[in-house]
Amino acid sequence: MSRMPSVIVMGGSLGGLTAALVLRDAGCDVRVFERSSAELRARGAGIAVLDATLRYLTERGGYRPQDVCSATGWIRFVRADGSVQHEQRHRYRFSSWNTIYRSLLRLFDSGRYVLGREVVGFDSAGDGASVTLADGSQVESDLLVCADGISSMARARLMPQVAPLYAGYVAWRGTLPERSLSPATAAALGDALTYQVLEHSHILVYPIPGLDGSLTEGERLINVVWYVNVAEGDELDQLMTGRDGVRRAISLPPGAASASAVDTLRSGAAASLAGPIAEVVTGMPEPFVQAIYDIEVPRMACGRICLLGDAAFAVRPHAAAGTAKAADDGWALAEELMAAGGDVPRALRAWERRQLAVGRSLLARTREIGDSSQFSGTFSPGDPRLIFGLHDPGH
């Protein structure tokens, strides 16, 4: 019988955790090193859930989609006066980052998901890979999977020529408890992915589980994502500088945005958004902001080290496929290792060809959608390109 490799996964977020689960099930000896000293938590982060994101939970974890996801039956575009511009029946599933993370973590071996172990260096030579931890210790494995996110240390070290490319706009995000809404707003937003298209901008609103995972109407959260153009340079620097005076590169967490930035957001919402959407945006207690970047790598594998999820390709959110892409990377890696009988170099060659194609296609599609909204003005209600999907719209 072929021997499956030992694996270190650097980063214990959704992509790293999914990879760890499927690689363990394939027969690999897997350890996850997560630099955070406590279980991860993303405050206020709602996600649209594609099949790839749910795949492990439903195929092997004993979950049903309705255990972890809210669902909507409509896509609806509204005008500034609140009237319906376009609507179509389309079922989407939504969840929160926290809900999916907690559900996956319950299925992994607690002793092999190690908190407070930051990887500060690594090397690949001969038949193995090694990592150096912040305490100075070294750990060996046959394969190192780097799932350390959009600010990946691994990518910066392996491919210093690859730099994030700012897309020219940011996403304002936040949530409001459904129970805080007026009855009319709750009825308008509770069963739909609701869009409003503005000049060089758009916003979308949808229900997600409550902070405790509740899926009961009235106990959920309403999640907002509003894409706003911000010029690179002084304007972006000012926005991304928090109340503490620190300039963040990627995102300002809830509560960190300056009072003036939040005031501008709320006044803009009151002036330009449909009533139900404006009610949510102006009521969000701690809106936060994420700068939108594109990242594309020429390779995903170097020796016995590979990059997974946002560490390789950071794509704009418009296909709702970021978490699905990371999960798909993990499933594909397990499949190629099994097909190669545990031969790591052979598996990585096949996996890299396969997942580079997925990443490049998804990045091109999300760039096209984002640019159509924020710059060219060709973002149209009902456009089939807007249907969420990993490989294609709806797929």
Image (cartoon, helix red, strand yellow):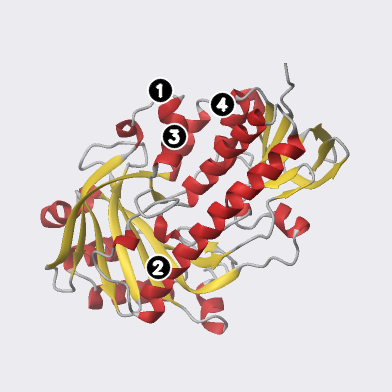
Q: Nearer the viewer, mark 1 or mark 3?
A: 3
Q: Give the residue drawn at x 45%, y 40%.
A: 52
Crowding near pointer 1: few (<14 within 10 Å), some, many (20+)?
few
Q: In this image, 1 relative to 260: left or right?
A: right
Q: Nearer the viewer, mark 4 or mark 3?
A: 3
The amino acid type of the residue labelled 1 equals Gly
Residue under label 2, please give it: 369
Residue 62: give its label: 1
Residue under label 3, please give it: 55
The amino acid type of the residue labelled 4 equals Phe
**Which of marks 3 and 1 precedes in the sequence?**
3
| Inter-mark Cα distance, 1 to 2 | 35 Å
**Which of marks 3 and 4 precedes in the sequence?**
3
On the question of residue 109 being in view, the answer is: no
The amino acid type of the residue labelled 2 equals Ile
Residue 108: give its label: 4
Q: Is residue 296 above or below residue 358?
A: below
The quadrant in which the N terminus is found is top right
| Inter-mark Cα distance, 2 to 4 | 36 Å
Crowding near pointer 4: few (<14 within 10 Å), some, many (20+)?
some
Circles 1 and 4, Cβ within 8 Å, touching? The answer is: no
Q: Secondary structure at mark 2?
A: helix
Q: Position of residue 77 (x, y in %)?
A: 21, 64
| Inter-mark Cα distance, 4 to 3 | 15 Å
Circles 4 and 3, Cβ within 8 Å, touching? The answer is: no
Residue that sits furthest to the top in the current view: 1
- Residue closest to the eye, 381 or 191: 381
Q: Nearer the viewer, mark 2 or mark 4?
A: 2
